[in-house]
Every structure is written in structure tokens, then in C-alpha cells.
Image (cartoon, rainbow, N blue to C red):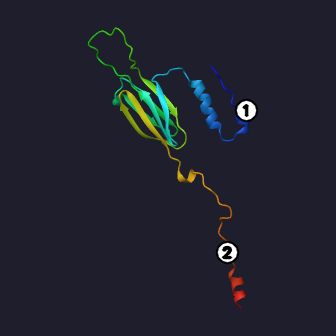
Amino acid sequence: MNRFDFTPYRRSTVGFDRLFDLLENQVRNNTGDNYPPFNIERRGEDAYRITLAVAGFRQDDLDITAHQNLLVVQGRKREEANDGEMLHVGIANRGFERRFELADFVRVAHADLADGLLTIDLVREVPEAMKPKKIRIGAQPALEVVRDEDEKQSDAA
């Protein structure tokens, strides 16, 4: 198992602990099970698509759950009555669970199942308050001097 040491990066960065933990956990939890195969595609600046090959699964057999920063796709194995004796079983129909870590502000926009492919469209929607803003230099309004009532009366006299 290849292990990358993030210690030098942890010393010189602040606030990236979650990212380094995710990378280390991914390496640790990588069991080598590549079922079902999948693609991750970038479709725009803030749009992504995950496509899973789920041949043999019906819409009712699949469950997609989006947590805060986690997308879980599960397929449940179903028992089918076969009229004959199976001589070779090459089409995998076993249950599975695939987990995808999502960045902040990424949400599931749409999911569809067609031709044995499950497509999940994701969108990153950064709230307006979190978007970068240009700060103009010298853009503050002029300040007014506030006087006490006593000062106002003495000036009037």
C-alpha cells in the first residue's frame, strides 16, 4: 500500500486538516473493490456528473442518499427465480455501496437511470455571502461629526 506523508504540508498550512484526513482515509479504506465501475466528469465550472454502470439493477433496487459532504449510492441485490440451471454467471448482480466525498456547497441536482447507467448530476452553489468580493480602496463614505446637545446649544448662542 502506498502511503503519502502529509506531515510537511500540515506544518505549513492552516485549516486544511479535513482535506488531509479525507485523503489519508481514502487510502486507508481503499479495499480494491471496483464494483460497480464509475466515471466522474466535470461538465462546467460548477457542474459535475457521476456515472455508475449498474447493469441489471432497476430503479427500485437503487438508493441515493446525500448527506452534508457525502453522497452514498447503494444497490440492493434481488433474488430472481430462474427457470433453468445457470451454467455461467458473468453479470454481477451483487449488492454494493459507493461513497463519494463532496466539497462544501455541492448538491445533487438530478439523478437518472437509463441503459444500465446511473447518472447523478452535481452542482456547486456557493452562497452569495461566501463568494469573493472586490474591495475598493477609499470606498468608505465620509464620516459625520456628532456633537453633544450641550455643544450644539453653546454654538447657537
Q: Amino acid at mark 2?
A: Glu
Name the residue that disc number 2 marks.
144
Describe the element under mark 2 as helix, strand or loop: loop
Name the residue that disc number 1 marks.
8
Q: Residue at x 58, y 28 (%)?
A: 26
- In percent of width and height, residue 13 lies at 70, 39
Quadrant where the N terminus lies?
A: top right
Number of other residues with Cα within 10 Å of mark 2, as a class: few under 14, some 14 to 19, many 20 or more: few
The CA distance from mark 2 to mark 1 is 51 Å
Query: Based on the displayed image, in which of its 4 quarters is residue 75 positioned?
Result: top left
Which circle marks residue 47 in the picture?
Answer: none
**View extreme (front): residue:** 44
Q: Amino acid at mark 1?
A: Pro
Q: Is residue 1 above or below residue 6?
A: above
Quadrant where the C terminus lies?
A: bottom right
Q: Residue at x 62, y 37 (%)?
A: 18
- In percent of width and height, residue 59 lies at 34, 31
Nearer the N terminus, badge 2 or badge 1? 1
Q: Residue at x 42, y 33 (%)?
A: 119
- In percent of width and height, residue 74 lies at 43, 28
Q: Nearer the viewer, residue 51 or 157?
A: 51
Q: Residue at x 57, y 51 (%)?
A: 131
